[in-house]
Image: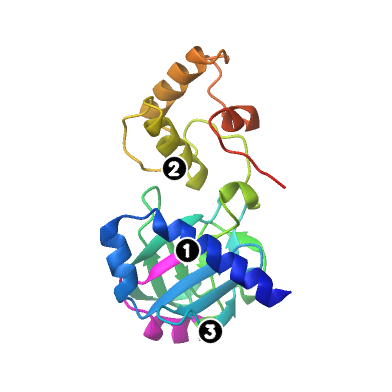
Amino acid sequence: MRKYLYKIILFFVAIMLIFTSSIYAEEIKQSKYKILIDTNEFSLYVIESNTFKVVKRYPVALGKKETPSPIGCWKISSKALKNHVFGGYWLGLNVPWDTFGIHGTNRPDSIGSLSSNGCIRMYNQNIEELFYMIDYDTPVIVYSGPSWIFSSYVRNINPNDKGADVYEVQKILNAMGYYNGPFNGIYDYPLIKAVQRYKMDYGFDYENYTLDMKFLNSIGIYKFE
C-alpha cells in the first residue's frame, strides 16, 4: 500500500512540474536530487532526479494552521549556518510572500506536529546531513495532495493573509482577466480590487472581502473525494 501511495505522490509531483517554467524545468533536470515534503506524513524525502529512487527519509515538523508551510514547488535559494533555534543549519526557499526554510530545532519534541511558524523543522543531526547533500537550486516540492486544499491549512482567506491559497487565487483570477498584480501570495490591495470585480460580476456580496469555500468553488477550486 505504501508503495502504491508513493507512486501516486510522484504522479502528482510530475504533474506539478509540468506546469513550471521551461527555465525551472531545466534546473530540475540538472539537479542531482529533488526534495519532497509530504505534509500528510510529516516526512521529507530526498529523491534522486534521474532514477526517482528515495535515498533518504526524515521526519519533520510543519507550520501551524495559522502559519502554514508553503504548499507548492520551490527551490533552495540560500544556505547558511545558523545556531540557536535553527539548530545550526538553514536551507532557504524562494517563496515570494515570506521567509521560509528547512532547518534544525531546539524543540526536538515538536517533530511530527504542526508547530512552526511555517518553516520545516528537522532533528539537528538530520539537517546537518541534508545541508551537505543539497545544492543551491535543488527543487523542493511541499506536497499535500493535488493542491493546498487537501492540506491541514484550509481556511477562509481574509485581507492581509499570506500563503499558497492566496497565490493560487491570484493565478486563477489573472487567467480570468480580473487580476493583474504580482503573484506574491499576499491578499493585498490589488487582489482585493480583483475580488471585488469578480464578486460584482457573479452576484456575490462585493463588500465582503472574505474568500470562503463557496467563492473558491466558484473559481474552480474543489476538494473532490
Residue at 58 percent across and 62 percent down: it is 62
- Looking at the rendered structure, the kind of residue marked 1 is Ala
- Looking at the rendered structure, the kind of residue marked 3 is Lys
Q: Position of residue 89 (x, y in %)?
A: 42, 77
Which span is picked out in magenta? 127-141
Please name the colour scheme applied to the rendered image: rainbow
Q: Position of residue 26 (x, y in %)?
A: 28, 67
Say if residue 106 shows up in the picture.
Answer: no
Query: Which one is in front in this view, the residue at disc 2 or the one at disc 1?
Result: 1
Q: Nearer the viewer, residue 138 or 111?
A: 138
Q: Are marks 3 and 2 in contact (CB under 8 Å)?
A: no
Disc nearer the start of the sequence (2/1):
1
Name the residue carrying label 1: 14
Q: Position of residue 210 (x, y in %)?
A: 57, 26
| Disc sitting over residue 167 in the figure | 2
Q: Position of residue 77 (x, y in %)?
A: 31, 66
Q: Is residue 139 magenta?
A: yes
Name the residue carrying label 3: 56
| Disc sitting over residue 33 in the figure | none
Query: Which one is in front in this view, the residue at disc 1 or the one at disc 3?
Result: 1
Badge 1 crowding class, 10 Å Cα cut-off, few under 14, some 14 to 19, many 20 or more, is few
CA gap, disc 3 and disc 2? 30 Å
The quarter holding residue 43 reads: bottom right
